[in-house]
Image (cartoon, rainbow, N blue to C red):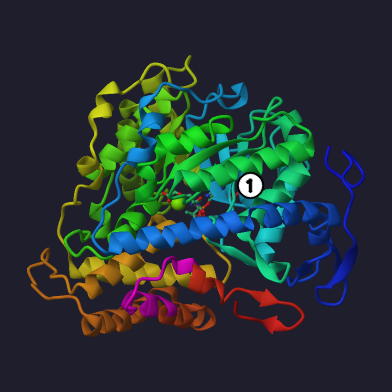
Amino acid sequence: MMGVGTNGYTAPATRKSSGGGAGYDVPEGVEIRGRFDEEFAKILTKEALEFVVELQREFRNRIKYALECRKEAKRRYNEGVVPGFDPATKFIRETNWVCAPVPPAVADRRVEITGPVERKMIINALNSGAKVFMADFEDALSPTWENLMRGQVNLKDAVDGSITFHDKARNRVYKLNDKNTAKLFVRPRGWHLPEAHILIDGEPATGCLVDFGLYFFHNYAAFRQTQGAGFGPFFYLPKMENSREAKIWNCVFERAEKKAGIERGSIRATVLIETLPAVFQMDEILHELRDHSVGLNCGRWDYIFSYVKTFQGHPDRLLPDRFLVGMTQHFMRSYSDLLIRTCHRRCVHAMGGMAAQIPIRDDPAANEAALDLVRKDKLREVKAGHDGTWAAHPGLIPACMEVFTNNMGSNTPNQIQSMRREDASSITEEDLLERPRGVRTLEGLRLNTRVGIQYLAAWLTGTGSVPLYNLMEDAATAEISRVQNWQWIKYGVELDGDGLGVRVGKELFGRVVEEEMQRIEREVGKEKFKKGMYKEACKLFTRQCTAQTLDDFLTLDAYNHIVMHHPRGSSRL
Ligand SMILES: CC(=O)SCCNC(=O)CCNC(=O)[C@H](O)C(C)(C)COP(=O)(O)OP(=O)(O)OC[C@H]1O[C@@H](n2cnc3c(N)ncnc32)[C@H](O)[C@@H]1OP(=O)(O)O
Ligand SMILES: O=CC(=O)O
Ligand SMILES: [Mg+2]
């Protein structure tokens, strides 16, 4: 078991960290630069931090190396190489092996709701009727110190069943249902994001090791008793590019299991296939995680973002308008089909992804049209062989559930055995890379700009998922807006879809930005516009869209603006 003095584990010397007056009790080598709070101190205990420090010290060099490998791959793609299957790992793709059996607690995952680790949303999501709730430290969360630490507090209360929330304005108290709550999966941040409020040996900690380490330390025991039926905790792993990154996670899991004294293979994770290079590594990723896997998921939004990013040096592979790049484009359908085939061959879940539509409260006809689009998307997924899907909002769950249950059958928890999709074994590199088809319009450029700026303004003020023009927007969808604008400006594309025949350049983009800022001000109102972070967001977004070389992530630069070091005020990394 974890804790000081058990399993021969001895705590290193400790000291107080100056977090704004009172201090956190921290191990040697740790400095907490985030605000002190009594509630946070219950999460940032000396023992929990020791665990995070162990992970950081053991894995930091491998993580740095993996990130260097990403840079090296980028260099090659920029020189004209395209990603493909790795000849060196052909034997993994071609031999027969399977992952560890699926834990009974998560055999049925037909609808999974996702959302940030906010208190009310966690309760609503767990009570929503979905089979799984993916609590998000990633695409849906702005990683402010407050959000991250409150998120950890909330998850701990959720796992021990004590979580409540009092909505004072509505005088409504939220608590968990007595039964049939969703099973909890947690998605830590991607490997690339640092945690600048926790310094370990003078360096910012790796964000995902903080998210994973604190959550695991505080919850593994209760989770295994109440949620996992002896398994768990469960995770979603985002934005990986290569199986070497999956191998690091596998080692982190083994390390955590050993430290906690629980069986190897207790922890289970679903990997999002949401980068272009990773689609060529699906078998390899599952193989690395074969004792800890519960499948793969089609993270479609980051995948589209990654298509642009991977081909940033290939002007012959430009995207059409964002809304035209859907799952029926050949490269997207091929990705989903191959993912299903790969997962079912290895006996794990092949999860579908997120439709962008959300309920539209004040317009029944538009609401029905949105629901219809969601139903169609889910029907395509279940018929293709997916075992479950994602919903962004509780109002979508009945429709998603109905489509999956009607087409999969209510007596079967998944279609792992019944939908083998052998036909997808013929999918080629060309299928997976096929150029998306469609036109480009000025309205496409405008929409990207309007949405990108508004999303970033929300993110800078601590909100990581927002409804914009009746669609769900989060970090992944905002990335598409950003990189698409960058790509169009960089290569001076012709807007061929609206008969204008103009080429996109910095000057046109500058005018679009100006006009869209005026439109945003009209739409949100002068007061909100003045109080919000729209101008800062506009500056950041514009810089990234017009940069000579593409920034790897929108949120890396933006992160500098939300780091709040105490007691010295804000600070850049
Ligand atoms: C690309 C990807 O990575 S997808 C995964 C990451 N993205 C996400 O997880 C997005 C999750 N969804 C959301 O954040 C929200 O649904 C939004 C921002 C899209 C829309 O939010 P809102 O407009 O505030 O929703 P709305 O006002 O309709 O909410 C109605 C109720 O549903 C709840 N609700 C809405 N979405 C969720 C959710 N995902 N989980 C739990 N509860 C939710 C609200 O808390 C609210 O509860 P209340 O009636 O008790 O007050
Ligand atoms: O994380 C999911 C995605 O679509 O991106
Ligand atoms: Mg994503």
Q: Position of residue 559 (x, y in %)?
A: 55, 71
Q: Position of residue 383 (x, y in %)?
A: 31, 26
Q: Inspect this view and state whether residue 164 appears.
A: yes
Q: Which residue is mark 1?
A: 122
Q: Inspect this view and state whether residue 468 appears.
A: no
In this rendering, the answer to whether 344 lies above or below 326 is above
Residue 141 lies in the magenta-colored region: no
In this rendering, the answer to whether 557 lies above or below 193 is below
Residue 546 lies in the magenta-colored region: yes
Crowding near the residue tagged with mark 1, few <14, some 14–19, many ≥20 C-alpha atoms within 10 Å:
many
In this rendering, the answer to whether 384 lies above or below 51 is above
What is the three-letter code of the residue carrying label 1? Ile
Residue lying at 58% horizontally and 67% vertically, measured from the top left: 462
Quadrant hosting residue 513 = bottom left
Could you say which is closer to the camera, residue 231 or residue 145? Answer: 231
Residue lying at 40% horizontally and 38% vertically, measured from the top left: 282
Q: Position of residue 82 (x, y in %)?
A: 26, 53
From the viewer's perspective, tell me whether residue 468 is left or right of residue 447. Answer: right
Could you say which is closer to the camera, residue 197 or residue 159? Answer: 197
Q: In the rendered view of the protein, which quadrant contains the N terminus?
A: top right
Q: Position of residue 95 (x, y in %)?
A: 39, 24
What secondary structure is marked by label 1?
helix
Q: In the rendered view of the protein, which quadrant contains the C terminus?
A: bottom right
Residue lying at 35% horizontally and 20% vertically, measured from the top left: 419
* Some atom of ligand 1 lies within 8 Å of the CB belonging to the residue at label 1: yes
List the single residue furthest toward the right.
5
List the single residue furthest toward the top.
411
From the viewer's perspective, tell me whether residue 384 is left or right of residue 191. Answer: left
Residue lying at 42% horizontally and 63% vertically, measured from the top left: 71
Highlighted range, magenta = 540-555
